[in-house]
Image (cartoon, rainbow, N blue to C red):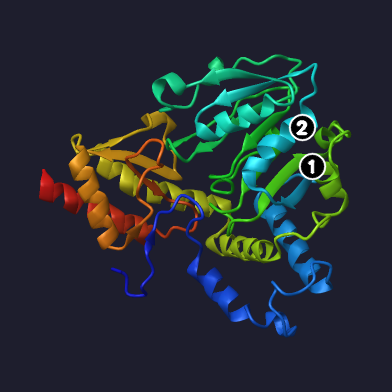
């Protein structure tokens, strides 16, 4: 590896980079957590020790993300993919429609699951343009009686991100924020339900965060399996069955790290700086590098691009790997290159990629 501490330049799309200090603290506490003589992974999820860890993580999440008091915070399992099913199962009644904004593979998957429970409608889509951009707010046409409007706030595969969210009025707004949750401050009250896998910005894989308005949850279908009801997990404080205890512990530690960085405003500034380093190389390369996403829809979390020709692109990825860069291959469905610059990816890692990209171009132009 090129770095003195032997850490890779990690641009994995998920599971992704975690703060070194969080990993080191977990290492220190792994065998004997707070003098209990056990690892956090070995103790009962019903114990007072774990309950404190669990509740503290919820409290930190509420404070950092400015979650209003009339919202529930849940730690669930099954990833965002299970939420694709749980949402229509709970909220899409047969006589209702739900509007899905199509911006990539994950919104396609969410829409497909909804077809099993009711009548979802693709209210707007940028598929014809290879998902290079986010639809304009004017394109999003939904019914006033829709069960909900669903969108994916950041698209990991195509490198696009919503900069402004639609005002859906009385129609509930639901967002899959798996790949940009807590990357910047947002107004939670604009949404009725937010869900996100933790493995991009919040911790290791295995935990799914759900933030939902209580009065919206009260409208859920009650004639569904117990484990798939949101009310089941609300009533048990996410402890209905054995939760991913280590993942929740790690999520709590990542939240502490975000606090140390100065909170979400500081994190947002860092993310803008990191993405700019790489986008500047693309924009100033005279076509040697070309971005996939249109400039107005660019993601600060996933930077997708191509190299001048296919053979050079293969060489770029090979040389990058040899130089200690990990995870720069684009998603298998679209190819190309992708640098995921989530919260925990250091500025220095993005600067190293910037330098590598410039050097590679200078060598081959």
Q: Earlier in the sequence, mark 1 or mark 2?
A: 2
The spot of residue 30 in percent (x, y) is 62, 78
Depicted 200 relative to depicted 334: above or below: below
Image quarter of the C terminus:
top left
Observer able to see residue 155: yes
**Mark 1, other Cα within 10 Å: few <14 / some 14–19 / many ≥20:** some
Compare residues 327 and 360 and report the one nearer the observer.
327
**Contact, mark 1 vs mark 2 (Cβ under 8 Å):** yes
Q: Which mark is residue 65?
A: none
Question: Could you tell me which residue is drawn at 51 percent across and 55 percent down?
Answer: 15
The spot of residue 226 in percent (x, y) is 85, 44
The spot of residue 88 in percent (x, y) is 73, 30
Observer able to see residue 162: no
Q: Which mark is residue 228?
A: 1
Distance (Cα) linking label 1 and label 2: 8 Å
Q: Secondary structure at mark 1?
A: helix
Question: Could you tell me which residue is drawn at 61 percent across and 14 percent down?
Answer: 141
Q: Which mark is residue 89?
A: 2
Image quarter of the N terminus:
bottom left
């Amino acid at each position: 590896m090129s770095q003195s501490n032997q850490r890779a330049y990690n641009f994995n799309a998920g599971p992704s980079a975690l703060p070194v200090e969080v990993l080191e603290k977990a290492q220190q506490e792994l065998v004997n957590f707070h003098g209990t003589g056990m690892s956090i992974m070995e103790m009962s999820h019903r114990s007072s020790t774990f309950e404190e860890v669990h509740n503290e993580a919820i409290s930190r999440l509420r404070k950092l993300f400015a979650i209003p008091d009339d919202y529930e915070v849940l730690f669930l399992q099954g990833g965002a993919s299970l939420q694709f099913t749980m949402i229509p199962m709970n909220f899409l009644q047969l006589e209702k429609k739900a509007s899905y904004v199509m911006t990539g593979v994950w919104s396609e998957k969410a829409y497909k699951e909804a077809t099993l429970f009711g009548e979802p409608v693709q209210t707007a889509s940028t598929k014809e343009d290879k998902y290079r951009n986010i639809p304009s707010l004017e394109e999003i046409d939904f019914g006033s009686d829709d069960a909900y409007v669903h969108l994916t706030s950041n698209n990991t595969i195509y490198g696009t991100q919503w900069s402004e969210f639609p005002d859906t009025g009385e129609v509930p707004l639901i967002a899959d924020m798996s790949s940009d949750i807590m990357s910047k401050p947002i107004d939670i009250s604009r949404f009725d339900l937010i869900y996100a896998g933790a493995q991009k910005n919040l911790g290791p894989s295995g935990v799914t965060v759900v933030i939902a308005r209580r009065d919206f949850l009260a409208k859920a279908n009650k004639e569904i399996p117990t484990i798939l009801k949101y009310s089941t997990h609300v009533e048990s404080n996410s402890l209905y069955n054995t939760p991913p205890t280590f993942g929740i512990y790690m999520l709590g530690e990542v939240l502490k790290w975000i606090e140390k960085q100065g909170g979400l405003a500081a994190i947002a500034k860092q993310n803008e700086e990191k993405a700019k380093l790489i986008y500047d190389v693309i924009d100033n390369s005279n076509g040697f590098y070309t971005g996939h996403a249109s400039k107005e829809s660019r993601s600060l979390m996933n930077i997708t691009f191509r190299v001048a020709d296919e053979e050079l692109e293969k060489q770029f990825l090979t040389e990058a790997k040899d130089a200690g860069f990990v995870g720069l291959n684009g998603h298998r469905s679209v190819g190309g290159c992708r640098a995921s610059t989530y919260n925990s990816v250091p500025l220095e890692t993005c600067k190293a990629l910037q330098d590598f990209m410039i050097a590679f171009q200078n060598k081959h132009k």
